[in-house]
Image: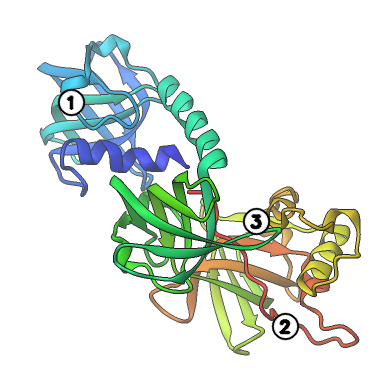
Amino acid sequence: MKLVHCLVFLLSSLLLAQTATPDRALGTVTNIDRGGRRITLRTDNGSEVVVTAQPTASFRRVAPGETDLQKAVTIALTDLSVGDRVLARGKAGEQANSVAATLIVVMSQGDIAKKQEADRTDWDRRGVVGLVATAGADQIVINIRGAGTAPVAVSLAPNAAVRRYAPDSVLFADARPSTLGEIKIGDQVRARGNRSPDGSKMTAEEIVSGTFRTIAGVILSLDAQQNEVRINDLESKRPLVVKVTAGSSLRRLSPQVAQAVAQRVRGNSGGPAAAGRGSDLQQLLESSPGITLADLKAGEAIVISSTIGATAERVAAITVLAGVEPILRRPGTQEMSLGSWTLDIGTP
């Protein structure tokens, strides 16, 4: 999972600070003035906060994932490094965007990297992703994509973390605490936990869910300053504004991959080796080269995966794929349509 985003939740939970207030700050260390006892943080919304450690301030280091301060290790200001994650608590400083801190909780950059790698390995080993086929307050059933579709009944382990993506956001940091009962049929779900020997059941320790859309359209215009693409939705035939954020993934399919995906979408397994039986379609997409907004041009077709936004006229992009004309074009015609093709959500 994206641990840097997850730490916002973990550190905030530690001190019941899930919303920003003038007497606390949460962010990544960008500068340390040890003589002046000042720490500059960049918060996750991009703003800058200066934390001044008071003479009696306590510095505590916790391991990523730890929520009990009694297990924290006492450290000194000299133990902090640029890149560490910090939660500072005290009172509002005299200057704007400043905190006079009496408690500073630290997760070191090195510990974060180790936990991130361990989590990534565990998600690969014990994680599943799929669409919800059956929803309930105590259990959901999701259809796992792969070489065929296999249903998995998912229930919660004690103290499991359940979160849901927010409208108009592709960041895990913006996902809010949720319940199993809030998940609906058709939602996309990623779950991590232990599965039964036959693979048909999972006791999940962590679930992230969301209501997502896959949209196909032709670019009408681009606004580089606003990081927006205006398209004509192929299905609704209406204009739609696509917001590209720092968390969005932009990729262009090569002609060979586009043809391979097109054959998979149409149910033809006799195409190129890249589209061979049992291959991972999502891995094909993720291996395609990244691009920027400047690489797109008016008149070309793109496919977007997005959250369900607060308004029907705007969406925030998770993935933007270019080079998709072979997938969208109906055989024997110049008409293009998305059909039943969908894109999975990204790894949390």
* Residue 259 to residue 31: above or below: below
Q: Which picture quadrant has residue 295?
A: bottom right
Rendered location of residue 255, percent (x, y): 87, 61
Q: What residue type is disc 1 on?
A: Leu
Residue 147 visible in the shown view: yes
Q: Count numbered badges in the picture.
A: 3
- The disc at residue 250 is 3
* Residue 120 to residue 340: above or below: above
Q: Residues within 10 Å of mark 3 (few under 14, many from 20)?
A: many
At 47% from the left edge and 42% from the top edge, which residue is drawn? 1
Q: Which picture quadrant has residue 54?
A: top left
Question: Marks 2 and 1: CB-CB under 8 Å?
Answer: no
Residue bearing mark 2:
337
At 43% from the left edge and 38% from the top edge, which residue is drawn? 3
> Is 257 situated left or right of 156 in this image?
right
Question: Marks 3 and 1: CB-CB under 8 Å?
Answer: no
Residue bearing mark 1:
69
Q: What residue type is disc 3 on?
A: Leu
Label 3 to label 1: alpha-carbon separation: 40 Å
Residue in the foreground of this view, choosing between 284 and 104:
284
